[in-house]
Every structure is written in structure tokens, then in C-alpha cells.
Amino acid sequence: MRIGIFTDSYKPSVSGVVTSITMLREGLEALGHEVFIFCTTAKVIPDKDDDKVVRLSGIPFPFKSLSEYRFVLFAGRAIKKIDALKLDLIHVHTEFTIGQLGFKAARKLKIPVVYTMHTLYEDYIHHISPFMEKHFRGEIVQILRTEVKKLVEKVDATFVPSEKIRKLVEEKIHCKGNVHIVPTGLNLDPFDKRQFSDYEIQILRKKYGLNDDDFVLLFVGRIAPEKNLSFLITAFKKMLTKIDKVRFLIVGGGYYEEELKSEIEKLDIGDKIVTTGFVEWKDLGIYYQLGNCFVNGSYTETQGLTFVEALAASRIILSVKDEAVEAIMQEGYNGFYYKDEDEFIDVVNKIKSDPDLVKEMENNAYLSAQPYSKENYTKRALAVYESLIHK
């Protein structure tokens, strides 16, 4: 099978979308299929793309938070190039210009088109304009949902990463499209704690000033307002008055980094919080071993790939209750939910004071990550591809 993947974001960018595409491509190629990536140029690109990557030039979006993305002009000229590849199916991972090219090519070439909904844009209005978010959120949400409905109903199949998004699509937006829950899979091996020696972990702990007896809360992800890190650091400050020898490690980069550091400074807890900045995905596995538990405060996750990574690393999850998380985390089995600062502090204290419970839950965490392997992800996607081509 020859499959064309269309995306606004690809390597060397790091995001859940890029991870999803990379895992799908690797899984399909391992089974003997050919995958072609259509994407935009970027500020920095690898020294040499492979011959299956087609980059289209464009101009940057005029927003700081979207600086990695490009608006592609005259993309229709690429359809002849797409036709020459004799694709069997097109899989679109974006709603914007590259995605529109994919939809147009699929119609013209009369081949099936699949769309993956990675992002709930109604949760990201503040990226474009805080003013619009504050004063016109209702109107913008309605416009966005109308566009999603049109899109889902015109493609042959739509992939959503979780039950949370399926409910939104079918019950709130009232789409009648062919919707499948296909969670993104990961290569879980790089996160397995058995990959790392105690010596390697200790060296990295020392690099960030973490003591042997520190109980470390760990966040891994993009530094952005919707991740609700402001809540986590405020709760952490309160925690310091009630729990001894606790530290907070924040791993990741993003446009909100400087603002976050400013918030930490105002709270006067900079000596208890460590920020690493951006860490490349290939180096990320060992960072999960620096934390005693993985913490999350976001209500905007569509699936939460870092949750899967944390579980694969045998880390207990502490999270606000959200439907996307419920698909991955079971209360008391591989993690705990909390609804406010006091409950957050209570569950940290519970874990810190019960080593036997920690050992049991860490084992459960590892086991619960296994259904989210790259291989299972590929099998689910391939089953839909084959049904559409056969049909």
C-alpha cells in the first residue's frame, strides 16, 4: 500500500502530532507499506530529509505561539507530483493549508481520505488572541465546531484519540461521519526503566541538583498556559509547608517558558523547582526516572502521550479528572485523581509515605502502558485503511 500523510508539523519539531505521525510511519513501513510525508518547510530542518519527505515552502503564521507553522501558497501545484506517486490513500493530520491540499488531491485522484483530529482548537483560542478568548469565545467555538462538522462529514473516516473526543464529535457537534477511536501508539522501549543504570540516573540527578532523598514531582510536556502549570506551582508552594524534602522538576520547552519562570520567581520557590528547558525526544526516556510521580493539571488533553510515556517508565500519575485521562489512568491502580490543592497535597503525601504501595502501582503503570504500543496503533489504523480501499 502507498500512503500519503499530510501535516503542517513534522521533524525536527517536537509535538504530539509529530510523534503520532512518526510512530504511524515507522509501524506501516515495518509491515512493508510505503509512506510519503507532505509537510511545510521549517526554521530548521534536518541536514538531509529522506526521499519520502516532500516539503512545500510557505510563509510563517503571524503569531508567536504558531511560529513553527507555515501558510502554504499555491499548494494546488503539488497535485501533479502527488498523482505521480500513485497513492492508494491519503491521511490528513491538519485542518490548514497542507490538509486542504490533501483533501483536494484525494477528491481529484478519487482515492480514500482519512482525517485525524489531534487538537480541540476551541481550547487554544488564547494562542491567537486573549481578547477574542475573553469577549467572543462562544461565537468562535460555534464557528470552529461548524467547520469540524463539515470536515468530518466529507472525509471517508475520522480518527480521534480518545472517547472524550468521540463524544465531543458525535454528541456535541452532532457529526454523522465515520468516526474511529484510534489512540496514538508509541515506541515504549525507550521509556522502560530497565534501559537505564542507577549510575546514569544519578549523574542526571546531580546535573539538576536533585538529592538522593528528594521526593520529585515530575512534569513533562510543552510549556504553555493550557497545561495549567500555574496551578501546579501554586499548589507546590503550599505543599512545601506540609511535606518535607519535596522538589518539582519541569521538563520541556515552549513559548511560555519565560512567563513560567517569572511566576516561580514571584512565588519565591526557585530553589525548589528545577526547569530543564527543551529536551529532545530521543533523550527523554531517562528523564522520567528522575521523578517519583508524574503530575498533570491540564483539562485540555485529547489523549495525553506524556501519560503513556510516564506509565511505560513505571511512573505513578497524579492528575485532575478529565475524560482523556480516564482512558489511560485507573484510580488507585496506576495513579490518583485530585480536584484541588489540598487533595493534590494529600495524594503526594500518601505516595511518599507508603513504599509498598509505590512498588505495586509502578508495576501496574508499566503493564497499563502496553496496549498503547506503536504496533497496536498501526494495526488499528491499517484495518480502517484496508476497509476503505476495499470498499
Image: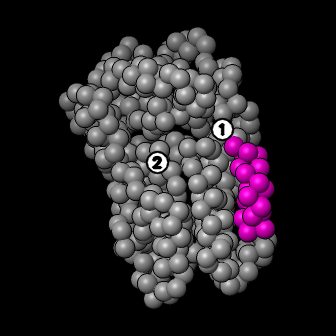
- The image shows residue 133, relative to residue 246, as above or below, that is above
- For badge 1, the amino acid type reads Asp
Residue 216 shown left or right of residue 82 in the figure = right
The colour scheme is: one colour
Find residue 129 and report its horizontal and vertical position in percent: 61, 26
Residue 265 sits inside the magenta stretch:
yes
- The image shows residue 366, relative to residue 372, as above or below, that is below
Indicate which disc residue 379 carries.
Answer: none
Q: Earlier in the sequence, mark 2 or mark 1?
A: 1
Extent of the magenta region: 256-275
Residue 52 shown left or right of residue 12 in the figure = left
Secondary element type, mark 1? loop
Residue drawn at the location 69% of the way across and 43% of the way down: 256
Find residue 319 and report its horizontal and vertical position in percent: 47, 61
Indicate which disc residue 49 carries.
Answer: 1
Q: Is residue 222 visible?
A: yes
Residue 226 shown left or right of residue 367 in the figure = right
Q: Is residue 308 visible?
A: no
- For badge 2, the amino acid type reads Tyr
Indicate which disc residue 299 carries.
Answer: 2
Quadrant containing the C terminus is: top left
Marks counted in the figure total 2
Find residue 201 and report its horizontal and vertical position in percent: 68, 77
Residue drawn at the location 36% of the way across and 16% of the way down: 107
Residue drawn at the location 70% of the way across and 84% of the way down: 212
Find residue 114 and report its horizontal and vertical position in percent: 36, 31
Q: CA distance from mark 2 to mark 1?
A: 36 Å
Report which quarter residue 165 is drawn in: top left
